[in-house]
Image (cartoon, rainbow, N blue to C red):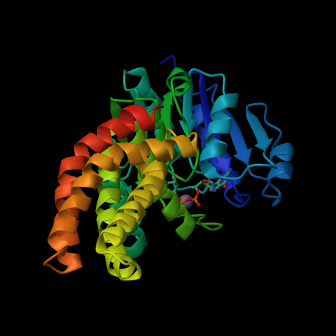
Amino acid sequence: MSLQSVTVVLPTFQEFASLPSLIDALLEVRRGELQELQLIIVDDNSNDGTEQLVEEINLDWIRLIVRKEDRGLSSAVIRGLQEATSEYCVVMDADGSHPASAIAAMVQAIHDGADFAVGSRYINGGTTEDGWGVLRWLNSKIATIMARPFTKVLDPMSGFLAFKRSTFAKATDLNPVGYKIGLELIVKCRCINVKEVPIHFSTRQLGESKLTLSVQIEYLQHVVRLLRFTHPKFVSFFTFATVGLSGAVVYLFALQLLTPLFTSTWQGIAASVWVAMTWNFFWDRKYAFWYARKNIVAQYIGFIAVCSVGAAANFYITNSLAESNAIIYSGFVGVVIGSAIGIVFNYLVSRLLVFKK
Ligand code: GDD
Ligand code: MN
């Protein structure tokens, strides 16, 4: 097959111990189907002998990039991909988890028309080495389920990837934070036809995993960012509604705390309406309209104006009921009706006028 033009991008951080056997495995691949395979190692200044090792073996198909400023798996992968010049690109781990023997099949899958190939543990024929604790297994499962809105791939967490360099070049809005560069690329390069090639995923023999708690929190943020990318209107409205709900709770608390401080009840209600609107403004500006954070004063005035219709209804109802009912009950009825009147109108006008892109 004419699959000669392949670059393997290998992110490394303190993988000195694992590198020799990986390079051996790649030599084997070069002796077989992919004789012109190139390797780009992107090392984040491990200072563990990696540089000397690459220098000593002195092979013209291996290139080492040592980054001193940045750190991070995904950004290292992207850096390597930017340096590649071949038609096909492969990304894999250095710790021996990913079998180099699967590279040819993955590249073949792209050659045969797939947009993207992943080395998969969960497709028929794929396996995971025993010894994965329940916790790591559960973690991987939950993370996989959270990726469902973006791809039907059974192993979207995989870091063993193949695609054309031209596919990578199509990526828009790449955000190289976190570990899940495969998921990021599938979404941002708009890959539809993803082929899973079964692999045996081995447990690393040497060195330590870099998967920490902060990596998992980053994953949650990553999922939110991807949702914003693929379903921006849904995320925006859903967030707006959630903020609205929290604002209703704030309103009830404010009524309870503020009305006793004023001489007349209506003043306390008005102050509470204002507190709740201001609360909503800050969270909506931050999370519902994350993409349009400009002149805060103008946006605040605009937002208050837009919300005033529902707020006025809320104020009127709360105030009328408060004459003969408990303030908290009156406020509850007022805010429910006010929100029902306002939510769609407030959202649409806020989005179209106040928080323009
Ligand atoms: N350059 C660079 N910088 N490389 C890094 C960094 C970094 O900050 N952090 C990790 N790496 C490299 C490691 O040296 C290794 O080659 C690869 O990225 C994966 O790191 P591991 O620490 O072995 O990760 P893992 O075993 O927890 O995660 C693997 O499995 C996940 C699925 O369960 C990786 O394949 C992930 O990509 C995959 O999502
Ligand atoms: Mn690993």
Residue visible at 86% across and 51% down? 52
> Looking at the image, in which quadrant does ligand 1 appear?
bottom right
For this orientation, the residue located farthest to the top is 2
Residue at horizontal 45 percent and vertical 56 percent from the top: 283
Res. 114 image quadrant: top left
Quadrant of res 47: bottom right
Position of 355 relative to 68 (above/below): above
Residue 142 in picture, x, y percent from top left: 34, 62
**Between 340 and 302, the one nearer to me in the picture:** 302
Residue shown at the point (46%, 33%) measured from the top left = 188
Position of residue 103 measured from the top left corner of the image (x, y, whole percent) = 50, 37
Q: What residue appears at the point 72 percent right and 60 percent down from the top-left corner?
A: 14
The residue lying toward the viewer, choosing from 103 and 297, is 297
Percent position of residue 78, x then y? 62, 38
Question: Residue extending furthest front?
Answer: 263
Drawn side of residue 182 relative to residue 91, left or right: left
- Does residue 166 appear to the left or right of 113 in the view shown? right
Q: Is residue 119 visible?
A: no
Taking the image as drawn, is residue 233 in sight?
yes
Q: Is residue 109 above or below residue 258?
A: above
Residue 156 position (above or below residue 168): below
Q: Decide if residue 225 is on the left or right side of residue 239.
A: right
Q: In this rendered view, identify the residue nearer to me: 357 or 350.
A: 350
Determine the image quadrant of residue 320: bottom left
Which x, y percent locates residue 164?
Answer: 51, 24
- In depth, the one of 147 and 204 nearer the eye is 147
